[in-house]
Amino acid sequence: MVKKLIEKYGTPLYIYYEEVIEKRIKKVKEVFKNVNFFPTFAVKANNNPNLLRIIHKNGFGMDILGEGELYACKLAGIPGDKIVWNGNGKTTKQKEKMKEYGVKYVNIDSVEEFENLWKNDDEFTLFLRVNPDIDAKTHPYISTGLKNHKFGVSFDLAEKILKTGKIQGLHIHIGSQITTIEPFKEAIEKTLELAQKYNINKINIGGGWGIKYKKEENELNLEKYKKEIIPILTNFEMVINEIGRFIIAPAGILAIKVILVKETENKNFVVTESGMNHLIRPALYNAYHEIEVLNNQEDNITADVVGPLCESGDFLAKNRKIKKPNPGDILIVKNVGAYGYSMANNYNGTTRPVEILIKKDGKDLIIRKGEEISDLYKNVII
Ligand SMILES: Cc1ncc(COP(=O)(O)O)c(C=O)c1O
């Protein structure tokens, strides 16, 4: 199937599967079936409007950061009353755009933001992001709930804002790719005390559900989540979550071609056409993505799988044992549906790839064209 798509569309190629998206959504909904659940999808994980439309059709609203992600929601036809606006640097101009579209929910990140934008506002439903000072035990760059992180307000500062009576809900998001229940539980329990003290009956518990990037890893244990966390949430009149990665990461793969295999005295390098421009997670977080080589080789090699860009950080895998590839072979990088294309970039004057959707009936559709080099320079004035 992938080979046929590559013949049709070439490489590099982002491929998403509708069936997987729907399966993952079902899993999330099943966990929350006994609470007043308002699920949203974190658009930062993947902003392709065609995918957002599928997710929305399956009952999800959207969590967005700014005007760019609002635009994706507009293209997907998602109404404002199903949108939650997040961010630690909101501006008056953004607020105007959100208001114009009818965005309903906002998560306030600081006392300063409250003073600047929300103190006198009656149009949005205001949630306050609290920082519970809890270690999510994930990569430091995607950990967000410790007091030295830039997100949210301490419980002491929160009380100052809550005393104004303007806030209707509390929000927490302690990080991403979290694979144990305990940090979620601790953060929610801590926040619950504050909610009770101020009669707050809406909560947004953020996203962060971890997936299985390595075969030997486990993803978040949903049975345990159901047993240990859901009972704490049943008294809320509204429970929002903002899950991105768990839904969309396993629904996407990246197919790339091997340019050459470079053998040196120290190391082997599999040089491919894509690197940190098309998937930056390994370079940024040392993240692991499974890589499958599509050939019939019996021999294995241990190699760094690297891109063609001018950075030593331009790698997709380090010291990876894989089937020995030949130039022209295809590699499949797994679990790239989240923070893959949405973090892709044009470094070294490279273009971003085509995105394809495989519908449930097996049909394939282009959902975003590949960029042309001229696209990169279209705003240049000479
Ligand atoms: C505020 C907020 N909500 C939701 C998410 C989505 O997280 P995830 O993709 O891990 O579910 C993020 C991502 O870090 C976030 O910052």
Image (cartoon, helix red, strand yellow):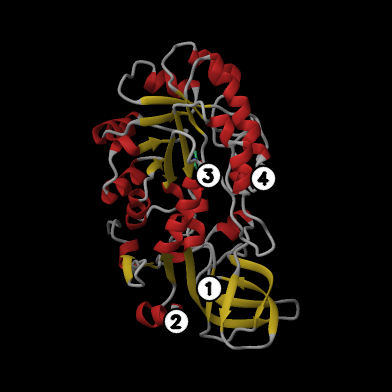
Where disc 3 sits, the SS reads helix
Percent x, y for residue 77? 26, 47
Q: Which residue is mark 3?
A: 31
Residue 282 lies in quadrant: bottom right
Q: Amino acid at mark 2?
A: Lys
Which residue occupies the foreground of this view, 371 or 171? Answer: 171
Q: CB atoms at circles 2 and 1 under 8 Å apart?
A: no
How far, Cα to Cα, is label 3 from label 4? 15 Å
Where disc 2 sits, the SS reads helix
Q: Which residue is mark 4?
A: 180
Comes first in the chain, label 3 or label 4: 3
> Is residue 9 at least partly visible in the picture?
yes
Q: Amino acid at mark 4?
A: Thr
> Is residue 146 at least partly visible in the picture?
no
How far, Cα to Cα, is label 3 from label 1? 31 Å
Q: Which residue is mark 1?
A: 332
Give the mark toward the camera: 3 or 4.
Answer: 3
Percent x, y for residue 63? 41, 41
Residue 322 lies in quadrant: bottom right
Which residue occupies the foreground of this view, 73 or 304? Answer: 73
How far, Cα to Cα, is label 3 from label 2? 36 Å
Q: CB atoms at circles 3 and 2 under 8 Å apart?
A: no
Q: CB atoms at circles 1 and 4 under 8 Å apart?
A: no
Q: Which residue is mark 2?
A: 3
Q: Please tell me whether residue 221 is drawn above or below residue 258 in the rendered image.
A: above
